Amino acid sequence: MAPTATAAIDPSQDLSLCHKLRKPVVEKLRRERINSSIEKLKSLLCTEFLQQQSDSKLEKADILEMTVTVLTRLQQQHFLSQSLMKSPQQRHCTELHKQSSFCKDKSPVNGAPWRPW
């Protein structure tokens, strides 16, 4: 009797086939999330992009680099404004608090990004 399509399939082969079929779909979703986030960054940092040459197309790496630059500048401004408003003793206590809170509560569950797999 000839083998049929309904013959028993090895479970490990079935699982491997499932992963092979699922991987492109998961990768497509991942790329869509990345592209969507980069477009959101681009729209949030509109003024920075207007300063760039309007005729050149910005690459994703350019958008990410500009985002890092802007966030670094904002963080420095925030830190400077906070340090000017506090006494030296308060600044020291704030730094100690930041260090202690940075070391604890690093559970991957709390801030874990969504993953489709």
Image (spheres, grey):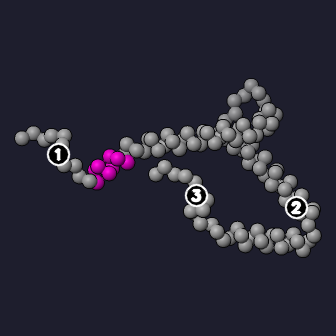
Q: Which residue is mark 2?
A: 82
In the drawing, does residue 58 fall left or right of residue 24? right
- Quadrant of res 50: top right
Give x and y (percent) for residue 107. 59, 66
Callout 3: SS = loop
Q: Main secondary structure of the magenta part?
A: helix
Cβ–Cβ under 8 Å for marks 3 and 1: no
Distance between the Cα atoms at labels 2 and 1? Answer: 71 Å
Q: Position of residue 63 (x, y in %)?
A: 70, 40
105 or 24, nearer to the observer: 105
Q: Amino acid at mark 2?
A: Gln
Residue 31: name its quadrant. top right
Earlier-in-chain disc, 2 versus 1: 1
The magenta segment is 12-19
| x 33%, y 50%: residue | 16
- Residue found at x 61% / y 59%: 111
Say if residue 18 shows up in the picture. Answer: yes
| Amino acid type at image mark 3 | Ala
Q: Residue at x 37, y 42 (%)?
A: 21
Which residue bears the numbered disc 3? 112
Q: Amino acid at mark 1?
A: Ala
Query: Pointer 1: residues within 10 angstroms few (<14), some, or many (20+)?
Result: few
